Amino acid sequence: MKKIIAFISALLMLPSPVTTYAESAETLSETVGNTTFYYTINSNNNAVITGCESYEESITLPASLGGCLVTSIAEKAFFGKFTVSSVTIPEGVTYIGDNAFSGCLSLESIKIPQTVTYLGNGCFTSCSELQNVELNNSLSSIPDNCFNACTSLKNINIPDSVTLIGTEAFFGCSDISGIFIPPNVKVIGENALG
């Protein structure tokens, strides 16, 4: 019994383990113009936009929030923002999460800055008014369902840097008149152009 008590006492005297998180659990907010942005700070001390509150049709994402560089747009950050017709993404953003702009039914155009190297699955799914998309030469893939059900998309230029077009990436793009697929594309997923 004395050994058990000594063992428990020894455990209690050990320093507490340090826990690290990829992103802080605390959601912060900052108002820029007429838009309130919600964000977290990741382990690299960069801001990750997790959402916004705005009645504006055009939203310009800030390059920094809380004094930290904005480098990511989180999963579903702008999901279902029905009134947003245009979004300006600043240089410095490298990551756009899954379904980040999915369901933005009024979104008409998007330009992906050169710094973005990752697009998440379904990031523009069901953006039914999306007509113009400018992709950059830093992307290596067009992920699954990326532009699925973008029924107003007329044409798109896939950069030479892309090697993979995901499953149903352009599925249901009924208004599309042409896609040039560069020779570097090695994989085209099922129903990518269905």
Image: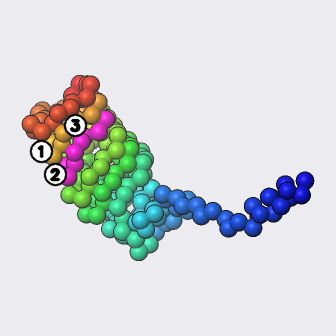
Pick whichever of labels 2 and 1 is earlier in the sequence: 2
Taking depth in this image into account, of 28 and 13 the one nearest to the observer is: 13
The disc at residue 160 is 1
What distance separates the C-alpha of mark 1 from that of mark 3? 11 Å
174 versus 49 height, above or below? above
- Is 135 magenta? The answer is yes
At which x and y percent is residue 18? Answer: 59, 64
Q: Residue at x 22, y 37 (%)?
A: 164
For mark 3, what is the residue?
Answer: 164
Q: Is residue 176 left or right of residue 54?
A: left
For mark 2, what is the residue?
Answer: 137
Taking depth in this image into account, of 155 and 140 the one nearest to the observer is: 140
Q: Is residue 25 left or right of residue 63?
A: right
At which x and y percent is residue 64? Answer: 36, 70
Q: Residue furthest bottom?
A: 67
- Where disc 2 sits, the SS reads loop
